[in-house]
Image (spheres, helix red, strand yellow):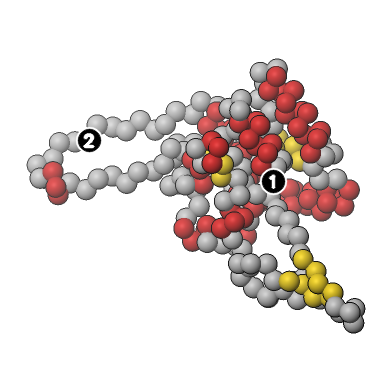
Amino acid sequence: MRQKYNWLFAALMVAALVISACTGVAPAVQAPAAETSAAPEEAAAAPAEGDYAAVDPTGQTVVWWHNHTGSRDENLKPLIEEFNKANEWGITIDAQSQGDYDAIRDKVNASIAAGEQPAALIVGYQNDQSFYQLNDTLLDLNTLVDDLKWGLTAEDKADFYPVFLEQSVNPLFDNQRLGFPQSLDGSPVLQSDLAGRTRFLRPTGYPGRIQADGLRRC
């Protein structure tokens, strides 16, 4: 998967754009089109630029509540530092470990009950997304994933396995995209024979071969 659209970059950009849009940046005002003598069928329509065309994420700070602790948290910090230093918009990610999913749920629910906006970026499962959206807390990320300026092209989307990219599209909420995946777990099925030999059973539809030495895709 290309570095430009790995999950971390995409998720952080989404959060920065949402924050920028919520600061009241007005869309660009279009000047009235000059009259032309060309026939209507010959007039070329101006290309659409997307709902977020006028949004500028420059200088935004994004608070991220995540569940990573210990070595995972330590390994995450250099990635955040690299993003903060290298992204051309000067976006700063304030990554805050909450310990676990339960702590994040409690904090988000407390924010909702108090009528406050929780962190711009939240880690949670699909059931969490559904519960939060009962209070209209989350943004439909389809508006950003499909945005003509900031969104993913067909080629970008092809970098993801479809089941990975679509896992947070929720049919209970008119197929809104209520999240963007940070990871995906797989549960292998093992089979042992009487000689003690173990092999992995290939999951249906998996586009590759699974080997026992490290469970790698090849």
Q: Is residue 56 left or right of residue 214?
A: left
> Which residue is at the far front?
194
Query: Tag 2: Cα neighbours inside 10 Å, few (<14), some, or many (≥20)?
Result: few
The residue at which mark 1 appears reads as 84
Three-letter code, disc 1? Asn
When the figure is inspected, residue 73 is found, relative to residue 199, above or below; the finding is above
- The reply to whether callout 2 and callout 1 are in contact (CB within 8 Å) is no
Quadrant where the image shows the C terminus: bottom right
Numbered badge on residue 147: none
Using the image as rendered, state which of residue 31 and residue 198 is in the foreground: 198
Furthest residue toward bottom: 195
Q: Residue at x 57, y 41 (%)?
A: 170
Q: Residue at x 73, y 56 (%)?
A: 185
Picture coordinates of residue 174, whole percent (x, y):
49, 37
Q: Is residue 197 above or below residue 111?
A: below
Extreme-top residue of the structure = 114
Q: Is residue 70 above or below residue 155?
A: above
> Circle 2 sits in a helix, a strand or a loop, which is it?
loop
Quadrant in which residue 96 is drawn: top right
Q: Position of residue 136 (x, y in %)?
A: 58, 27
What x and y, as percent, mark residue 205?
60, 67
Give the residue displayed 24% in from the left and 31% down from the top: 32
Kindly identify which residue carries mark 2: 33
Question: Callout 1: 10 Å neighbours few (<14), some, many (20+)?
Answer: some
